[in-house]
Amino acid sequence: MPKCDYCGAEVYLPYKCKYCGGIFCAEHHLPENHNCPGLKRGEWTPTYMPSRYALEYKVYTEEELRRPKFRLPALFSPDELKDLVLAMMAIFLVYFSIAINYFHPIAFLYILVAVFTGFFLHEMAHRFTAIHFGYRARFVATREGLIITALSALLPIKIIAPGHVAIYTYSIDRRKLGLISLAGPLSNLLIALTALILPISGLLKLFILIVNLDIAFFNMIPLGILDGYKIFKWDKAVWAIFFIIVLALWVYVRF
């Protein structure tokens, strides 16, 4: 089934743009909605009153739909990039005080690296696992989550919940949801274990371990909308084994 070149959603009735030749869904079929490279200022005028011709569509052959394009689809929409940047800024504030305590000139750069590996890769693991299963997914930051995350910088317990990966589907079975939820904390665990093995700076290693294990441990709590609750509902044994491993490493690094 063809997919929209802009957002990647599967489409049953695809629209082919006459300016750039791309295939798009109903939401992005207009040139201005998919940043059409073939649209030039002064050469196109929007029609505000649709005619009967605007309601007609053409059925394209499989060969036409699979014809290679010269333009690659956008990996992230501008809104998603904005949400990701805001979320990483909120998490950076949480660990800002840690960097200050070490009085190291490069500590703030190390914190940025740790936040990227801990948060960004965690969310991308969720996102691309959902896409692998055929769902449309994107990261969404929430105002409440950003505020709570930033305020937790003042608390001994850190709350890392600036947003979530939204999966656009009417229904999803428990196993797939459990695997999508497990992908995030699993990425944090793998990064933490890699940091323990690799011969990198001791301070950078510490920051990577703290951020990744904090995010993994917090998300494995089986409550509310956290990853741990979805994993627990899918397979209690998987949740228990993974939670014990993460908890042991978290205690080892923190104490």
Image (cartoon, rainbow, N blue to C red):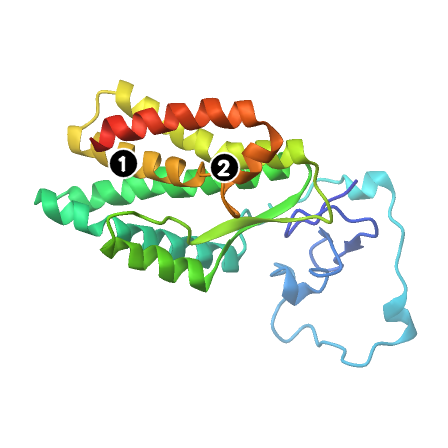
Looking at the image, residue 125 sits to the left or right of residue 194; the answer is right
Residue that mark 1 sits on: 210
- Contact check, label 2 and label 1, Cβ < 8 Å: no
Q: Residue furthest left?
A: 103
Q: CA distance from mark 2 to mark 1?
A: 19 Å
Which circle's residue, 2 or 1, is located before the other in the chain? 1
> Residue 245's image quarter?
top left
Q: Is residue 238 above or below residue 145?
A: above
* Image point (63%, 76%), residue name: 42
Asked whether 60 or 123 is in front, the reply is 123
Image coordinates of residue 68 in percent, x first then y, are 70, 40
Residue that mark 2 sits on: 228
- Quarter of the rendering occupied by the N terminus: top right
Residue 27: mark in rendering? none
> Residue 17's image quarter?
bottom right
Please, what is the three-letter code of the amino acid marked with disc 2? Gly
Please, what is the three-letter code of the amino acid marked with disc 1? Ile
Looking at the image, residue 220 sits to the left or right of residue 13; the answer is left
Q: Is residue 147 above or below residue 1?
A: below
